[in-house]
Image: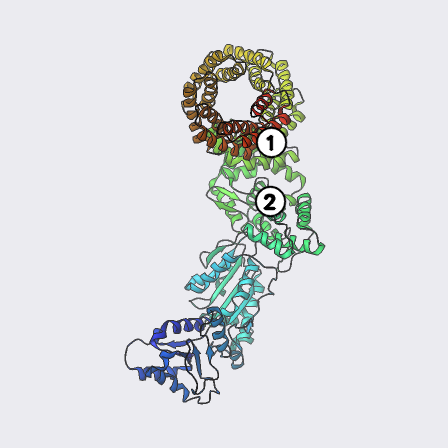
Amino acid sequence: MPCEEKKHFFISYSHHDEEQAVQVATIIEEAGYSLIIQKWHFSRPGGWVGMIQNAHLDTDRTICIFSPHYFESDICKAEWTVRYQDDPNGDKGLLIPIIIEPCDIKGLPSIHNHVDITDMDWELAKAKILNMVKAIPPKISSFLGKSKQHALQPDIRGSLPAIFNVPQKNRNFSGRKAVLKNLHKALKTGKGVAVTQAISGLGGVGKTQLAIEYAYRHRGDYLIIWWVHSEEPVQLAFDYAALAKELNLPQRDSQKQEEIIAAVKHWLEHNDGWLLIFDNARTPDDLIRFLPRGETGCVIITSRYSIWSEVACDLPLDVMESDEAVEFLLDKTGQDDEKSAKKLAKELGYLPLALEHARAYICELGIPIREYLNLYKQYHIEILKRSKAPIGYKGTVDTTWKISFDKVKNESKEAGDLLNLFAFLAPDNIPLGILTEGVEYLPKSLSKTVSDPLELNSALQSILKYSLIKLHKDLVSIHRLVRAVIRSRLDKKGAKKWAKAAVEIVNYSFPENPQDLENWPDCERLLPHALIAAEHSQKFEMAPESTGRLLNETGLYLQERGEFGEAKTAVERALAIYEATYGPDHADVAAMLSNLGLILKDLGELENARKLMERALAIDEATYGPDHPDVAILLSNFGPILQDLGQLESARELMERALAIDEATYGLDHPHVAITLSNLGLILQDLRQLENARKLMEHALTIDEATYGPDHPKVAITLSNLGLILQDLGEFESARKLMERSLAIDEATYGPDHPYVATMLSNLGLILRVLCESEDARKLTERALVIDEATYGSDHPNVAIDLNNFGMILQDLGELENARKLMKRALAICIKSLGEDHPKTKLVRDNLNSLGS
């Protein structure tokens, strides 16, 4: 152990100024200097002369906190005069006054080197105090030679510690404020093992850059900052031992490296003020013999390996926050296209290495961010492969994970297979359950592993160790660029193999009836994986039956959620696969045509929907004959499309034919019969056969309530339909009760912002209007309009209905000009979507004309 040395300062102050004195002491101590202050070190009252004398003997200099109170104190006078006797002219700088309040210092000796912080901003005052002590060397240890000891100083004006070998600072570093703050807090407040922080994470996430940035930002906190390249054992030992020369240790020239390492470790264990950084360490076992014991100094470890809890506090490092990534792109390229920057950052998964690639490419070629975004979307991983490693990084996006991939595959072939499978699914929240559920569709080697929980956990652990995935409960997440690199490294045969496995396990788990509310949680969970897996399998023309079925079910679920554009895309893809697989006249193709036709109906594309339904009906009639229940389903689907086209008699004929088939097939009280009854009732309503419509709808409601219970969304539809008929019959209070019940069911089922809820709101609003409750009607209709515009856009027929209804309510409220504006907009939508002669177009036109010019 080194011998005890004098402390740097004694802080002299009046008890009136104790708070300011403690602030000054804290600043000086945090800068690496030692001191004595009454508040912290004088343990008993009285005996001031002896304590002052000891403080004088145990310190090199005295700092006086000058204020009017100071000069009124005899004790303070004694404290500064003791030091004055050793330096009457102030040549040695042993007496350092800090003036905190205006006071008369004229005539005082040794006062030419004072610091005046009266009424000064505290940050500026802090800088002046630090500047005042900057020339005073800290005491490290008698292990250091004199020349080295006097050179070591805390950072005051940006200078580096004398012992400092950190790599060059990255000028493009930005963001990570919260992580840097947490790291600094942990290192400065921790005790024992808590001062060892392991920054672990995916390659390219910026672990090394974070450690470098921390070292430069906090260089003033340390007297020594030593960087140890730790990826290879030989380099690790060499870098660690090299610190012996910097410390001037007696063992520095020993021929035995272990002896030098032991001496460095011993020094670190018995001295403070140092930061040791082990960069890119492989495992804890590689570092055990190098990590100092005890509570001196600080250690940072960076590693792709994630399990450090036995030797350090874990600090997992994730990708950048989205706003940090966008700020990086804009700031470092000097551009202001925030929209493109957001899209590019998301495409790159907010990975610092990929963002740095993009920045360098954009800056070198002088291209806009949006142009790089288009290139990336077109060439994807290829553009990153061709880029050189950015400054400060050891590899490109293509190469940086190669070592980790190789280690995983060497440890466990099954772990490598898992990575390959994950690469063909969506990046986030992959349910492990789909592996076990669809185990029969996995390659044999992987199916054996998945079937054994211990083997599966072992394979996952092999991947987790190198931060290539994240695991939360039974959900796996993998960075989108890791997926892209894995896929790029597979040959065509391998890619086909894993694309097929991925789509088949997702298809097996995806629910049979996605319109059923009970299946929605599973559909929601599997939706992103279904879309991604289907995209890859379609690209390689693998598993067409599974791919087509999965896309169709996905489309039906999206339709049920009111996401009609996405639903259309999914079912169109399914239809193309089935037509290519089975030919244009297959019954399964007819099913896809019918599903797509109903989606087009929801989108207001009625003529296209009609063509698809006619083609589907022709296929089914040729396949099954004219009286088959599958033909009845098509007829029932087709009828509402003709109804929306205003062809009511044709729609009635189809629906009556469907009803006859259903009743003959299922009996009079089957849910299929209820659907057909309801559809036929709505057509009869439009034909103004209201009593017949009412009877059919009441029968349908009886069937639905018996089948599903009173609070099912299918019951809500029938309630709403019956309410509309009762409204036309003039039974407004009864209609209102049915509509309110229907709305309550839908809000409980779908939430407040679903398009089905909007329909109920609009219908109820019309009833309230008739009941002269116009203000309440207005609120409901406004809410419906907001939902529908958010769902469909501004030019959808459903939006036109809302606008028409809203205009009628405003007319009743006397707001004629606003009503006219809404009606005109509704008419324009109807003409564009439905045509000049559609019944809805005529209705809106009549309503507009009723307002006058």
**Element type where label 1 sits in the image:** loop
Figure quadrant of residue 701: top left
Report x, y in % for residue 659. Answer: 52, 12
User: Where does the N terminus fall, quadrant-wise?
Assistant: bottom left
The residue that label 1 is drawn on is 795
Report x, y in % for residue 629. Answer: 55, 14
Tally of numbered tags = 2
The residue that label 2 is drawn on is 483
Q: Nearer the viewer, residue 702 or 618?
A: 702
User: Mark 1: which amino acid?
Assistant: Asp
Figure quadrant of residue 194: bottom left
The correct choice, above or below, for 383 with respect to 225 in the image is above
How packed mark 2 is, by other alpha carbons closer than 10 Å (few <14, some 14-19, many 20 or more), is: many
Please give left or right for residue 253 compared with residue 94 in the image.
Answer: right
Please give left or right for residue 740 compared with residue 546 in the image.
Answer: left
Sequence order check, earlier mark of 2 and 1 = 2
The correct choice, above or below, for 820 with respect to 336 in the image is above
Residue 279 appearing in the image: yes
Report x, y in % for residue 374. Answer: 68, 45
User: Where does the C terminus fall, quadrant-wise?
Assistant: top right
Q: Nearer the viewer, residue 843 or 521?
A: 843
What sort of colour scheme is used for the picture? rainbow
Figure quadrant of residue 616: top right
Q: Nearer the viewer, residue 802 or 429?
A: 802
Please give left or right for residue 572 compared with residue 25 in the image.
Answer: right
Residue 506 appearing in the image: no
Report x, y in % for residue 483. Answer: 60, 44
How packed mark 1 is, by other alpha carbons closer than 10 Å (few <14, some 14-19, many 20 or more), is: some
User: Mark 2: which amino acid?
Assistant: Arg
